[in-house]
Image: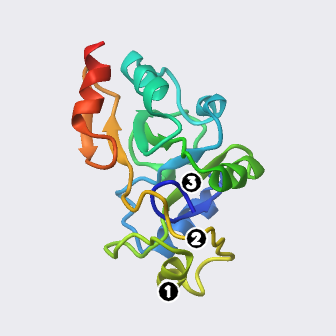
Amino acid sequence: PTDTVYGVGASAFTEEAIRRLFFVKQRSVKKGIPILIADERDLGKVAVDIPAIAEGLIARFWPGPLTLILPKRKDLPPSISDTESVAVRLPDHEVAREIIRAAGGTLATTSANLSGHAAAQTASEALDDLAGAVAIVIDDGPSEGQVASTVVDCTGETMRILRSGPVSMEDLQEVESL
């Protein structure tokens, strides 16, 4: 469970686990796997050289349904993304954050559904799509947010919205103009 939709996760620092995540999701290896962090202090475990615009977005929207594309640490497994960047989010959901803390503060995580299928809103929906492919399903009731996170690329001169979601363009632009 997260504050957006149900997710499926694996160790963010284990190449084999990330490859398994791609396999379970039937996801193209050209699409990176986002990393959820338990607390803001965990950001440095996966990203470096945080741009000023990202710092403003973090201050305003984390924890919450905003995923940021940031420069990635060199010691992350190559399969997490085939670029020099990584998607990172701090969810606003205590059960998710406790699970991530128990895993060391980071989890490679994506929506708990097969690629191309609707995102799971409940544990039973996640299990319907991923039955037999995941070790455990944690049921914390229906997802709070019902919509996948907004994704913003912060690696260029200006931020770029890659996926619309709960955080609106207007809200993002308020931070950019500060």
Amino acid found under the numbered disc labelled 2: Gly
Q: Is residue 128 above or below residue 24?
A: below
Q: Residue at x 46, y 54 (%)?
A: 33
CA–CA distance between discs 2 and 1?
A: 15 Å
Query: Image point 54% across, 46% down: which residue?
Result: 91
Q: CA distance from mark 3 to mark 1?
A: 21 Å
* Left or right side of 138 for 72: left
Three-letter code for the amino acid on which mark 1 is drawn: Asp
| Residue 164 locus on image (x, y percent) | 26, 48
Q: Nearer the viewer, mark 3 or mark 1?
A: 1
Which one is earlier in the sequence, the residue at label 2 or at label 1?
Answer: 1
Side of 49 relative to 96 (left or right): left
In the displayed structure, would residue 153 be above or below residue 177? Answer: below
State how far apart marks 2 and 3 are (Cα).
22 Å
Q: Report if the CB atoms under discs 3 and 1 are less than 8 Å apart.
A: no
The disc labelled 3 sits on which kind of residue? Ala
Q: Residue at x 64, y 75 (%)?
A: 137
| Mark sitting earlier along the chain (2/3) | 3
Q: Which mark, residue 108?
A: 3
In what element is the residue under mark 3?
strand
Q: Secondary structure at mark 2?
A: loop
- Disc 2 versus disc 1: nearer the observer: 2
Residue that mark 2 sits on: 141
Colour basis:
rainbow
User: Which residue has dot 1 on it?
Assistant: 128
Q: Residue at x 29, y 31 (%)?
A: 171
Q: How many marks?
A: 3
